[in-house]
Amino acid sequence: MVSKQVKGSGKDDADVTRADSLAREIFSDIANKWALLIIEAVGDRTLRFTELRREIEGISHKMLTQNLRLLERNGLVERTVHPTVPPRVEYTLTEPGQALRATVDAMCDWTHRHLGAIESARHRFDSA
Amino acid sequence: MVSKQVKGSGKDDADVTRADSLAREIFSDIANKWALLIIEAVGDRTLRFTELRREIEGISHKMLTQNLRLLERNGLVERTVHPTVPPRVEYTLTEPGQALRATVDAMCDWTHRHLGAIESARHRFDSA
DNA sequence: CTGTATCCTCTCGGATACTG
DNA sequence: CAGTATCCGAGAGGATACAG
């Protein structure tokens, strides 16, 4: 569950509701294709904007900046600007970002382990 | 990485590319808010359509059916129709679905553990 | 190189109504 | 109850141009 109700805690209903909607908001932020792919792409490395863009097949300039801001705002990636010319901006995962990455890794593993099963499930479904 | 290139395997480039795009396709299917919330909601239970709808706060009739079909097509949920009147349709997670649920659980845990950190990261970001 | 802004298209997604 | 179809508005997301 995204929103687990903790009975008997010291918090009142208003607090629980607030935490709930916050959790949902965060979940919506990160449970999206591009955000997760970015997290995977960065990994434990330090990458520049253009490197990231090359790394993530099919992402547009706009989506990359947009999602990087989102991740930065939520404290998942750290953005360091080197005041040189031309500018050099580097992105890294923060500690929370790394923790999340572990779970995303698990999702990717799952995907690869079930490629075959999913493909045949699709065929079965599509011929009906 | 979603698409890890396995060097030295018996597969040729065409196969690798195909598996890659398939992986990306699957990833896009499941890395979306509603799909993940549905997986979480079903859990290890057996739920009817209307029960699911009540369970998942804010999901519309349309999004629920749409995403259920998607999950069914990929073999993550099983749909059993009881030919009664009124009809009774039940949804369960398949074995692959359960495996994926474990990783989604981890993501939810992560969200709850970092609620505070994220909230303050946001405040820092927003006042700049 | 990195980032912002604009325009424009297309899909997402809600509301509603209608079938078995 | 469960599902499909339609309409329609809001937002996602690409392409392009421009600034620092």
Image (tube, coloured by chain):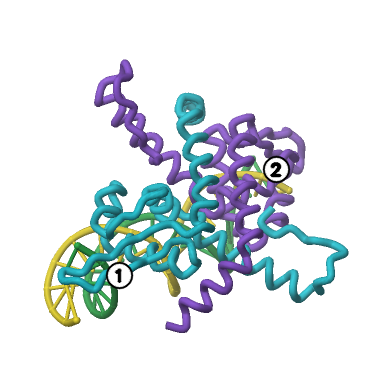
Chain colours: A cyan, B purple, C green, D yellow
- For discs 2 and 1, the disc positioned in front in the rendered view: 1
Badges 2 and 1, same chain: no
Q: Is residue B16 left or right of residue A70?
A: left
Most foreground residue, A107 or D17: A107
Location of mark 1 (residue): A81
Mark 1 belongs to which amino acid?
Answer: Val
Most foreground residue, B104 or D15: B104
Q: Name the mark on residue B125.
A: none
Spatial CA span between label 2 and label 1: 43 Å
Position above or below: A96 against B49: below
Q: Chain of mark 2?
A: B
Residue at image position (69%, 44%) is B42
Question: Quadrant of residue A18 in the image?
Answer: bottom right
Q: Secondary structure at mark 1?
A: strand
Most foreground residue, A19 or D6: A19
Neighbour class for label 2 at 10 Å: few (<14), some, many (≥20)? some
Position of residue A9 measured from the top left corner of the image (x, y, whole percent): 84, 66
**From the image, which quarter does the N terminus of chain B lie in?**
top left
Mark 2 belongs to which amino acid?
Answer: Gly
Residue at image position (31%, 49%) is A56
Position of residue D14 measured from the top left corner of the image (x, y, whole percent): 25, 58
Q: Chain of mark 1?
A: A
Q: Secondary structure at mark 2?
A: loop
Location of mark 2 (residue): B43
**From the image, which quarter does the C terminus of chain B lie in?**
bottom left
Neighbour class for label 1 at 10 Å: few (<14), some, many (≥20)? few
Position of residue A59 measured from the top left corner of the image (x, y, whole percent): 30, 53
